[in-house]
Amino acid sequence: MTLADVAAASGVSVTTASLVLTGRARELRISEDAERRVRSTAQELGYRRGVLVSGPRPGPSRTIGFVLDTVTSSGLAGEVVKGAVEAAYRHGFMLFAGETGGDPGLERSLVEAMRDRRADGIVLATTHTRAIAVPERLHHGPAVLLNATAGARSAIPSVVSDEVQGGRSAARLLVDAGHRHGVHLIGAGPGSYDVPPHSIAAVQRLMGLREVFAVAGVEVVSAHRCPRWTPEAGYDATRELLRRHLPKALVCFDDRLAFGAYQALGEAGLSVPGDVSVLGFDDHPVASWMRPRLTTIAMPHHELGVQAVEVLVEMLGRRGRGARPPLIRRVPMPVREGGSVARPQP
């Protein structure tokens, strides 16, 4: 199957088909309709770009492919890639990164392109922790999932944040500050199923929180599930809460929820942490701009990138020897102290 066959079946020129399949369609303003036709036709016909696929395999290429579902230049994703690049360099590898924008078709194409270019292994990363459908060709060689998990039948290892430990750390912060009553949750709960759709992080954070609170005898008065973790959702949930309760502490499942909670508390004439302690998760950039700075349980973005490459390099070193790394490597979530948690006032 040739490029000319794909172009003819798609009703476009060979040049247009080539630009689409090399990822330059948007750059050169090729219509979305033409781009979809070319990609769909190439997939249906089984077309594969002929890059380094003929002739004997020369041995390790010393390259790692990194496929991410968001823009690598954004702050949080950039830290993940930075950690991966540094770890790859230490082990003598080059790292090639590609972004999918959340497009499953583009994700498959990037994985296939990196396999065709004989990358020694591939890291497939997601911005938000979730279970994913793994592209078929990811199973055709060493691979690691970053911030994602696969189905039970997949043997691909995952590197994820230790969200249960993060929930425990959040609960201990409040317990150590003397909070036993008047604690409310913003974002998820009270039950394990009262979480945003497909949110593994919410379920596990809730598990860690409830575990420590139960041992310490802390009463969780209410929980407000938010389908989306945005400042608007945090603001609305906190305003609704204040109609019925005067809280002593809020555990917000995301720093953006906490940002909204700050606004609602301020409008009600309540201070942080004088009247209400507020705790967040993720160490989003907004946390450092809040006054007082938000105390938060941080996502270890840089270390996640490092550990994903470390696991992949370990797999490459063991190739052919049958041993496998653990299926899930959990990276601790550090506490970022701010000024938003204090001992409750009588």
Image: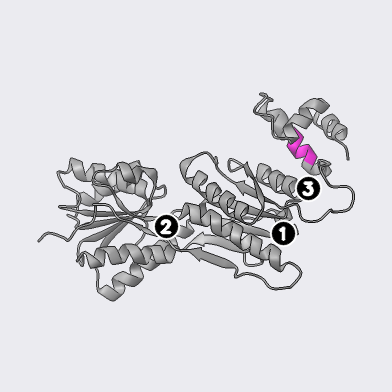
Identify the residue under disc 2.
Answer: 195
Q: Which residues are magenta?
A: 38-42
Counting residues from the N terminus, which is met first, the one under dot 1 or under dot 2? 1
Q: Where is 49 relative to 156, above or below?
A: above
Secondary structure, mark 3, is: helix
Residue, x 80% and y 31% (percent of image)?
Answer: 10
x then y, percent, for residue 316:
70, 63
244 horizontally vs 232: left or right: left
Label 1 Cα crowd, 10 Å radius (few <14 / some 14-19 / many 20+): some
Query: Seen from this angle, which residue lies furthest bottom?
Result: 215
Residue type indicated by callout 3: Asp
Instruction: Tell me the chief SS of the magenta region.
Output: helix
Q: Are marks 1 and 2 in contact (CB under 8 Å)?
A: no
Q: Could you classify mark 3 by the number of other residues whose Cα lies within 10 Å: few (under 14), some (14-19), or many (20 or more)?
A: some
> Could you tell me how far apart the alpha carbons at marks 1 and 3 are, in whole angstroms?
14 Å
In this figure, which residue is indicated by the disc labeled 1?
139
Label 2 or label 3, whichever comes before in sequence order: 3
| Tags 2 and 3 touching, CB below 8 Å | no
Q: CA distance from mark 2 to mark 3?
A: 40 Å
Looking at the image, which is closer to me, 239 or 159?
A: 159
Please name the residue shown 44% across and 63% down the image.
Answer: 332
- Magenta stretch encompasses residue 225: no
Query: Which of the 4 image quadrants contains residue 320?
Result: bottom right
SS of the residue under disc 2: loop
Residue in the picture at 49% in, 40% down: 74
Which of discs 1 and 2 lies nearer the camera? The answer is 1
The residue located at (85%, 30%) in the rendering is 8
The three-letter code of the residue at mark 1 reads His
Residue 116's disc is 3
In this view, the mark in front (2 or 3): 3
Q: Quadrant of the N terminus?
A: top right
Disc 1/disc 2 C-alpha distance (Å): 31 Å
